[in-house]
Amino acid sequence: MLLSLIISILTGALAGWLAGFFINKSQGGFWWNVLWGILGGFVGGWLLGQFGFHFDGWIGSLVTALIGAIIVIAIVNLIKKHR
């Protein structure tokens, strides 16, 4: 259980780092992208589950977290832009 949580956090962190390459206008920098990636891993898992998608394995988890991280970083950038 604890190992699974640690792997999920590390996968989300990697996804956040990768999402920073997809979203060039990311305002937060490396550490914020990592944090948003961890949150995005949970968001991506929930969101894709709502549409009936489920990816297996580590690569599937990374893809799910990457999708979630891109969504979270895009939302954060929209909020920051309108301040």
Image (tube, helix red, strand yellow):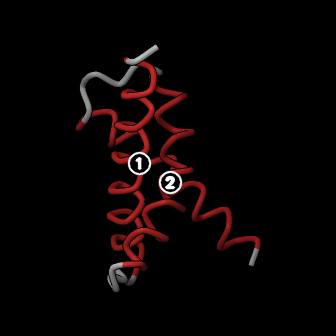
Residue 10: x percent and y percent? 56, 54
Which residue was labeled with disc 1? 69
The kind of residue on which mark 2 rests is Gly
Which quadrant of the figure has residue 54?
A: bottom left
Please state, as top left, top right, bottom left or bottom right, where the N terminus lies in the image.
bottom right
Can you name the residue that lies furthest to the front here?
82
Q: Residue 64 appears at what percent x and percent y?
A: 37, 65
Q: Residues within 10 Å of mark 1 (few under 14, many from 20)?
A: many
- Tell me where residue 80 sits by quadrant: top left
Residue at (42% x, 79% y) in the render? 49
**Marked residue nearer the N-terminal end (2 or 1):** 2
Mark 2: secondary structure: helix
Q: Which residue is mark 2?
A: 12
Q: Where is residue 37 drawn, in percent x and y? A: 48, 46
When the figure is inspected, residue 47 is found, relative to residue 22, above or below; the finding is below
Mark 2 nearby-residue class (10 Å; few <14, some 14–19, many ≥20): many
Answer with left or right where residue 1 lies relative to residue 32: right
Question: What residue is shown at x 38% (from left), y 27% (from top)?
Answer: 77
Q: CA distance from mark 2 to mark 1?
A: 8 Å
Residue 32 x/y as whole percent: 53, 29
Which residue type does callout 1 highlight? Answer: Ala
Q: Assess whether mark 1 and mark 2 are in contact (beta carbons under 8 angstroms).
A: yes
Vertical placement of 72 versus 9: above or below?
above
